[in-house]
Image (cartoon, coloured by chain):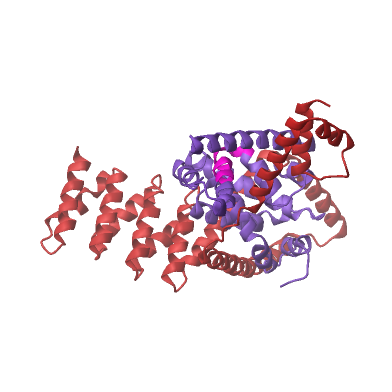
Amino acid sequence: MNCEQAIERHAMRLAGESAGDDLELRAHLDSCAACRETTAAYALMWEDLGELPDATPGPLLQARFDAMLEAYRHGTRAAQDHQVGWGTRFGAWLESWWPRRPAMQLGMSLALLVVGVGLGAGLQGRRLQIDALRHEVQSTRAMVALSLLQQRSPADRLQGVAWSARLEDSNPQVLEALLATLDDDPSVNVRLAAVDALSSMHESIRVREGLVARLPRQTSPMVQIAVIDALVQLQESNAMDAIRKLADDSHADPAVRERARWAMQKLTS
Amino acid sequence: VSAATDDELMQQVRDGDAAPLAELFARHQVPLYNFFLRLTGQASTSEDLVQETFLRILRAKHTYRGQGQFKAWMYQVARSARADHYRKRWRETELPEATQDTLASQAPDASDEIELDQRHALVRAALARLPVEKREVLVLSRYQDMRYEQIAQVLGCTEGTVKVRVHRAMKELREHYLQLTRDKVS
């Protein structure tokens, strides 16, 4: 055993399972002062590494987890209720098609088996599985977001908006919920967060139309400015009329009117 | 507090009862948070990633095969959550410079009473300087209390590869440690 091998074996024993005494390593260390020094330094460093204290996560992490779990359970219950109703209706529909004569039933069963095997073989692609998993994660996020948006606490609704913004593809239900939040939510902070989340879904025409339609309805100057900024960011030229009205509105907050004039310049340049 | 093992709790979750996930969260949130914190250096990102990991556990519950491998499976999910997080944001996975500076600035001052603190500060700074893949294998080995076999499962490689990676990581950690010591002395 040379020095390099000795140090390597010592390091691996430190980090792994020390199964018994390594006589060869011990013999080398007994005869090599340099390796004794190096391995002792490694051991000390490993010990120091282990003594670094763990940090504690903030209390909000537990609260967020609880909200997520509750939202998930709530969503699952709602989905199960929906499935029962749908299942009953589907069963009745299926029964109306099912033949009464045993021979016909056998024929129908064989036909369904052939169709089922064909479909099953076609669906055995890894890509499909990954897509399905991704879809499931996305749908869970959407479900959690929707549940949180309906909570009474503004902090929970803010969490709901944050979850919405993390969806990879804009979900129509979530999008409508965000627009409704912008319309009705009593908290300015939640409405501001909703504007941010909506502007991240810039590819949706519904978002652009929704923001344009909602600009005149806003009463908070901060939200008005946030919507104007979002429309400029989206380069939404259809917003020009709504923005011009705000710029000309003598009752509007001066800062909002100023921002509206700035937005008009941006959208025409 | 439940006496059930992680594996038993996860099997209940897999079978449709989401409640035992709360116990799994209670048991693993701190180690998982520190796993992310040691890799990212960012507290809020680490909290987000813990949350994301447990959401993914819930969604991927039907893929859990049991056999007492919950911890390795959870860290596989955690790694995937972290990789997606950074892929989405196009950020480097190195610790922020500010964190490294702060850590390095805590290093020596020649007094015996604080010698241990100095060594800890140095080793923490040296760890922060490692590339993320080397830091990860050390963190799994030193802090998550995992055996080579489990780490291999998490990283999707052989036990032999893990041993080589651990050795290389320790070697580089030692080099950074010595360099930091020299910098402070000079």
Q: Is residue B46 visible?
A: yes
Q: Is residue A5 left or right of residue A133?
A: right
Question: What span is colored magenta in the figure?
Answer: B122-134
Q: Relative to residue B78, is residue A80 depicted above or below?
A: below
* Quarter holding residue A140: bottom right
Q: How many marks?
A: 0
Q: Relative to residue B44, is residue A203 depicted above or below?
A: above
Q: Give how far across and how far down residue A191 sits, in percent.
A: 35, 63
* Quarter holding residue A9: top right
For image coordinates 28% across by 60% down, the residue present is A223
Q: Give how far across and how far down residue A210 sits, in percent.
A: 34, 55
Q: Is residue B166 left or right of residue A180?
A: right
Of the pair A257 and B57, the residue shown nearer to us: B57
For image coordinates 50% across by 37% down, the residue present is B185
Q: Give how far across and how far down residue A59 sits, in percent.
A: 52, 67
Q: Is residue A133 visible?
A: no
Of the pair A13 and A173, the residue shown nearer to us: A13
- The quadrant in which the C terminus of chain A is found is top left
Of the pair B25 and A162, the residue shown nearer to us: B25
Chain letter, colour purple: B
Chain A hue? red
Q: Give how far across and how far down residue A67 sits, in percent.
A: 54, 67
- The quadrant in which the N terminus of chain A is found is top right
Q: Is residue B158 left or right of residue A237?
A: right
For image coordinates 66% across by 56% down, the residue present is B57
